[in-house]
Image: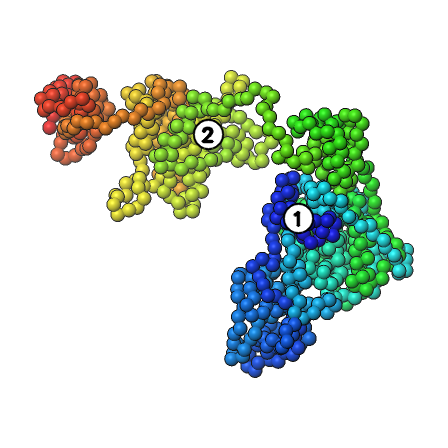
């Protein structure tokens, strides 16, 4: 809601800086997102009267002489299509600043001197959506009835001297979607009386109610009133009215439509005006739309009405989608003479659904869905009729037709002073609380500790004692409430050892270059038990949205595979991602949750680069990543064992179970072809990953922290070892033998080559290793290293029948 500071001053006496006032409003609960002063950055904009206007031959330009209140008229060249003699316009004098900090200078156009600029509203900062349509492609022309004179500053006339508050309201404070509601709010904040005038209306036309019938379903429209205004003359609204509309973000249209928009801004009550010719049946019906009914709206959009849409008809044809937008067939036109004014309250839920259904949310529908003041309906109708008599020369016909008029009991809330103080943690006196409700214009009765408050209809958001507490607290001032220690014992925050370890695992995996993914816990029953060694009983949802979200997952790999399919369909084939989350099962009559971690890799080890070979990710690369994780967690790799196993949806020969000290902690391998081939994007791709049961893994970690050591002061000694062994001898067996006989100075061991081929026997294979020896306290001698190498060679020859090469 855009709230005009100058308009607020019609209701509340204000003499403080608008920005200071905005700060006070924000501190009490209604956030002011921004305060705009349209005049900022601009100068030397005045009213000019065009004395004459002559076209420049061969161009679209015109030479004008404009009276700007100076001794001599200014010659100005203007290319606007609507420029003409006798018009009162906005002129930027030489030296003026207009929108976007553009400076106006004396210049020549087509050889003709131009001493200033005649401006359109957009050129002086007005947004396109508020500029009157007939001036959208040209200059702005002041209405003929405007009380202006040449040379007068244009800022005040156009409302640019105003300050505009952008109220960023929450849905419960829809009472501030009106100037009167905003005035009551500002009056309470500043402790200033609010002046809202009553309407005194004199009907000066014949009674029309006997010749017109209204049929309203009270469930659809609990309140519905009609007035008829005759002999109206359609034209431009007065400048003061246009000014208030465009400062509130609404485009002026004509003096009838503008009145209904103005009353909506003033009171918060949406209204609509119909051309009476659309009701030649002398009948109006409020009902739900019939199947296949259509309506062309005022914005020329044709909609297929839904059976749940509330519509207004003339008994035969639909003329309006109630509470949302009128129909083109009942639009106020230039030759309209008789107008029907509607003021009503419609079912908010149906209005909201209709606006969303047809993608046609309007200022009216926004107010209906949030709620409107039930006490303003007839008052708004009378105010609109009065303005149409004043600004459109209309005749107010006698009588109001009531289609429905549901009554609401005034809200009375009983509570106590002590309850308010207990909730707020304050010691506010009864007199202070009574004064606060007086500022709100609420009637309050206080009897010792008891409090009874009569809540006016304009504050429909207040219904329970807690609402009164909020009102007292925000007007008393949250900053004035003293800070106190909590009554209950303070709970110390922090993470358990298990949580700390899981966070460390995530950090390590992220450090390996993987990106975290988050997937749904709900999936299909088939996917829920995929990628698990021994599926358990499913946890199913009683009322699932669909079959694909009907069970809780027992693995994380399913979500990562779905994410891979999504990314690969968008040409993102280089993947390295992980997810840490919970899986669920039902076992031993108990619902169980378990912490898991899963990773998924696809593509090359490195992005394509001239420095790197295009090494593809395979089982051993992923196993190496997992090994590094175990090392960082302090797990002894001697305790880790990989066993070939069959896991649902994993590759039958490229999958292994992971065991630590004999405990199954997860699986590692390649996603099965049957899974990847289901997706066109993944077909032919190789996806590798692993999934770990973190609860089991964490329980096996003795020291989850890494201890840093200083770099060694003494040099290491490297030796290479090449051996020939039988085909069935594994690398692990060789490494175990080397480590067992390498002595205390064997610091590191790496395999650097594996060979099988024509140069060695068919049942043999060759391993090459690099051994690193290091004494952290002294320099190693060749004698010590040679002794260790001899011991290793002897053990390999004796126990593995190895041939040292």
Q: In this view, which residue lies farthest toward the bottom?
A: 57
Residue at the disc numbered 1: 16
Name the residue at 65% across, 36% down. 477
Residue at the disc numbered 2: 581
Within 10 angstroms of label 2, few (less than 14), some, or many (20 or more) residues? some
Residue 640 pos. (x, y %)? 31, 22
Nearer to the camera, 756 or 227: 227
Q: Which mark is nearer the camera, 2 or 1?
A: 1
User: What's the mark number on residue 441?
Assistant: none
The kind of secondary structure element at disc 2 is: strand
Q: Quadrant of residue 589?
A: top right
The first of marks 2 and 1 along the sequence is 1
Q: In this view, which residue lies farthest toward the left?
A: 783
Nearer to the camera, 20 or 139: 20
| Mark 2–mark 1 distance (CA, rounded to whole Å) | 55 Å
Within 10 angstroms of label 1, few (less than 14), some, or many (20 or more) residues? few
The kind of secondary structure element at disc 1 is: loop
Q: How many marks?
A: 2
Residue 110 pos. (x, y %)? 52, 78
Q: Quadrant of residue 666?
A: top left
590 vs 363: above or below: above
250 vs 797: above or below: below
Which quadrant does the C terminus fall into? Answer: top left
Q: Is 96 displayed left or right of 560 in the figure?
A: right
């Amino acid at each position: 809601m855009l709230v005009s500071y100058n308009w607020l001053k019609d209701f509340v006496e204000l003499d403080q800086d608008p920005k200071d006032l905005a700060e006070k409003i924000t501190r009490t609960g209604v956030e002011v997102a921004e305060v705009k002063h349209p005049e900022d950055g601009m100068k030397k904009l005045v009213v000019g009267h065009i004395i004459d206007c002559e076209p420049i031959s061969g161009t679209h330009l015109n030479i004008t002489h404009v009276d700007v209140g100076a001794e001599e008229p200014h010659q100005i060249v203007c290319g606007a299509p609507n420029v003409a003699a006798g018009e009162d316009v906005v002129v930027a004098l030489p030296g003026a600043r207009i929108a976007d900090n553009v400076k106006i200078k004396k210049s020549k156009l087509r050889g003709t001197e131009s001493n200033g600029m005649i401006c359109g509203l957009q050129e002086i900062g007005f947004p396109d959506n508020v500029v009157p349509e007939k001036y959208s492609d040209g200059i702005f022309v002041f209405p003929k009835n405007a009380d202006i004179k040449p040379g007068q500053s244009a800022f005040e006339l156009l409302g640019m001297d105003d300050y505009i508050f952008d109220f960023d309201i929450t849905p419960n404070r829809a009472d501030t979607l009106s100037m009167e509601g905003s005035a009551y709010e500002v009056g309470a904040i500043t402790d200033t009386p609010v002046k809202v005038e009553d309407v005194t209306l004199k009907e000066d036309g014949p009674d029309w109610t006997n010749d017109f019938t209204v049929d309203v379903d009270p469930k659809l429209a609990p309140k519905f009133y009609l007035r008829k205004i005759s002999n109206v003359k359609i034209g431009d609204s007065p400048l003061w009215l246009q000014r208030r509309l465009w400062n509130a973000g609404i485009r002026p249209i004509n003096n009838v439509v503008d009145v209904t928009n103005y009353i909506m801004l003033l009171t918060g009550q949406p209204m609509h005006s119909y051309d009476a010719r659309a009701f030649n049946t002398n009948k109006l019906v409020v009902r739900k739309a019939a199947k296949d009914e259509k309506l062309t709206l005022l914005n020329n959009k044709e909609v297929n009405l839904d059976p749940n849409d509330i519509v207004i008809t003339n008994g035969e044809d639909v003329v309006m989608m109630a509470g949302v937008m009128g129909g083109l067939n009942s639009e106020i036109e230039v030759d309209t003479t008789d107008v029907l004014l509607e003021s009503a309250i419609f079912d908010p839920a149906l209005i909201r659904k209709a606006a969303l259904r047809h993608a046609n949310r309007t200022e009216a529908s926004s107010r209906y869905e949030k709620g409107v003041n039930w006490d303003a309906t007839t008052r708004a109708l009378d105010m609109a009729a009065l303005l149409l008599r004043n600004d459109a020369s209309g005749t107010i016909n006698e009588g109001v037709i009531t289609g429905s008029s549901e009554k609401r009991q005034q809200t009375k809330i009983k509570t106590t002073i002590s309850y308010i103080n207990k909730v707020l943690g304050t010691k506010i006196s009864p007199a202070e609380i009574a004064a606060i409700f007086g500022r709100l214009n609420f009637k309050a009765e206080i009897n010792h500790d008891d409090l009874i408050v009569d809540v006016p209809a304009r504050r429909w958001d207040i219904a329970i004692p807690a609402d009164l507490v909020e009102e007292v607290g925000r007007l008393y001032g949250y900053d004035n409430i003293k800070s106190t220690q909590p009554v209950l014992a303070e709970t110390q925050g922090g993470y358990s050892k298990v949580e700390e370890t899981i966070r460390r695992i995530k950090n390590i995996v992220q450090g390996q270059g993987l990106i975290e993914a988050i997937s749904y816990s709900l999936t299909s029953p088939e996917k829920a038990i995929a990628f698990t060694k021994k599926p358990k009983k499913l946890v199913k949802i009683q009322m699932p949205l669909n079959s694909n979200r009907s069970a809780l997952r027992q693995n994380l790999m399913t979500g990562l595979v779905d994410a891979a399919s999504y990314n690969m369909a968008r040409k993102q084939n280089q993947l390295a991602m992980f997810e840490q989350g919970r899986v669920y099962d039902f076992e031993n009559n108990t619902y169980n949750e378990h912490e898991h971690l899963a990773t998924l890799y696809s593509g090359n080890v490195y992005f394509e680069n001239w420095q790197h070979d295009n090494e593809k990710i395979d089982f051993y690369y992923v196993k190496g990543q997992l090994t590094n994780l175990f090392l960082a967690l302090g797990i002894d790799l001697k305790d880790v064992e990989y066993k070939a196993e069959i896991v649902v949806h994993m590759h039958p020969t490229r999958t292994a179970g992971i065991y630590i000290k004999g405990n199954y902690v997860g699986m590692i391998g390649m996603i099965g072809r049957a899974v990847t081939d289901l997706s066109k994007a993944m077909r032919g791709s190789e996806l590798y990953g692993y999934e770990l049961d973190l609860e089991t893994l964490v329980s096996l970690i003795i020291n989850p922290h890494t201890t840093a050591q200083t770099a060694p002061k003494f040099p290491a000694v490297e030796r290479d070892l090449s051996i020939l062994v039988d085909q069935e001898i594994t690398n692990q067996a060789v490494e175990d033998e080397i480590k067992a006989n390498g002595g205390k100075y064997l610091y590191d061991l790496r395999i650097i080559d594996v060979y099988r081929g024509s140069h060695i026997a068919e049942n043999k294979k060759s391993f090459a290793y690099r051994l690193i020896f290091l004494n952290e306290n002294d320099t190693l001698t060749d004698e010590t290293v040679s002794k260790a190498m001899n011991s290793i060679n002897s053990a390999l020859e004796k126990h593995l029948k190895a041939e040292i090469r």
